[in-house]
Image (cartoon, helix red, strand yellow):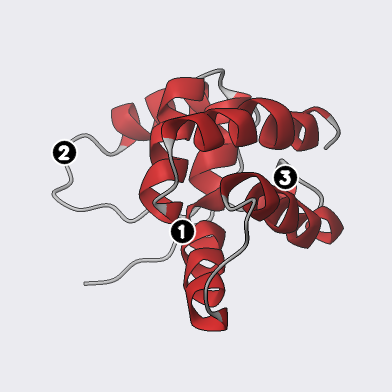
Amino acid sequence: MKLNTNIEFEGTLAELAEFMEATFKNHDKIVFTAKLNNIVKPAKVESLLDDIIKVVAPSGFTTEAAESSCRRALRESLPTIVGFVESNAKINAIKELRAATNCGLREAKDAVEEVVARYVGNA
C-alpha cells in the first residue's frame, strides 16, 4: 500500500525528526523526503554544488564521468547534509559528504564549515 501525505511543519530539523519518530513509530517503513528549497534558495543550489565540488576536489576530476557521478551523488545527499548543518550536527554532515563524494576528512570538514554553513546562513 502506498499513501502520500503532505504535512506542514514549522521548526528545526531536529524537532521535525522527533515529530516524525513519535508520529510514525509503529510503522515498518516510512520514506521521508525533505525539500531543500526551504533551507537553501533554489537559485543557489547549483552554486552550492559548484562551491562544494571546488573544495572536495580542488584538482578537479580525471574524467567528466567522475565529476558527473560525484555531482549526482552530492545532489542526492545535499538535503541531508544541509539539514545536519542547520541542526548543528556538523560531524554527521561531514560523514554524509564523505560518503557521497569519497573525499578526505579535511576536504569534507572544510566544505561543511566554509561552504555549506555559509549557504544555510544566507537562506
- Label 2 and label 1: CA atoms lie apart by 17 Å
> Which circle, 1 or 3, is nearer the viewer?
3
Amino acid type, callout 1 = Thr
Amino acid type, callout 3 = Asn
In this picture, residue 83 sits left or right of residue 22: right
Against 57, residue 111 (above or below) is: above
Residue highlighted by disc 3: 38
- Label 3 and label 2: CA atoms lie apart by 28 Å
- Label 1 and label 3: CA atoms lie apart by 18 Å
Q: Nearer the viewer, residue 52 or 76?
A: 52
Residue 25 drawn at (x, y percent)? 21, 34
Q: Residues within 10 Å of mark 2 (few under 14, many from 20)?
A: few
The residue lying at 76 percent from left, 62 percent from top is 46
The residue lying at 78 percent from left, 30 percent from top is 118
In this picture, residue 24 sits left or right of residue 16: left
Q: Residues within 10 Å of mark 3 (few under 14, many from 20)?
A: few
Residue 26's disc is 2
Residue 86 drawn at (x, y percent)? 62, 27
Amino acid type, callout 2 = Asn
Against 72, residue 11 (above or below) is: above
Residue highlighted by disc 1: 5
